[in-house]
Image (cartoon, rainbow, N blue to C red):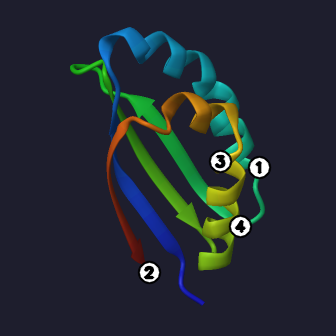
């Protein structure tokens, strides 16, 4: 069983930064509490405040898919689902 690693960047409009920041703590807390989540880091770029970086590690593809399913029905996705994402997924 391979671990799943996702890294990348999400970009929002300047007018959306406050909305993203308001949901960030809850999204991080819920994601880290999911079964199979080994690492979940999501942070705002210090130089480009409209960019947010992510590093996720899940124990298995099933755990990663469960995270995706939970996220799809969350306030986080409702607000950020349309934003540009440049993510890379790999297994280790």
The label shown at residue 92 is 2
Q: Residues within 10 Å of mark 1 (few under 14, many from 20)?
A: few
Q: Is residue 28 visible?
A: yes
Residue indicated by mark 3: 71
Q: How many marks?
A: 4
Q: Earlier in the sequence, mark 3 or mark 1?
A: 1
Cα distance between the residues tagged 1 and 2: 21 Å
Q: Residue at x 63, y 61 (%)?
A: 38
Cα distance between the residues tagged 3 and 1: 13 Å
Residue indicated by mark 1: 33
Cα distance between the residues tagged 1 and 4: 9 Å
- Eyeballing the image, is 64 above or below 76? below
Is label 3 in a helix, a strand or a loop?
A: helix
Is label 4 in a helix, a strand or a loop?
A: loop
Q: Is residue 60 visible?
A: no
The label shown at residue 36 is 4
């Amino acid at each position: 069983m391979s671990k799943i690693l996702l890294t990348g960047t999400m970009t929002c409009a300047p007018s959306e930064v406050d909305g993203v920041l308001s949901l960030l703590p809850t999204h991080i807390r819920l994601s880290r509490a999911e079964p199979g989540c080994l690492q979940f880091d999501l942070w705002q770029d210090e130089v480009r405040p409209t960019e947010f970086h992510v590093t996720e590690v899940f124990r298995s593809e099933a755990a990663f898919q469960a995270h995706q399913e939970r996220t799809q029905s969350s306030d986080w996705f409702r607000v950020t689902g349309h934003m540009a994402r440049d993510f890379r997924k790999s297994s280790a």
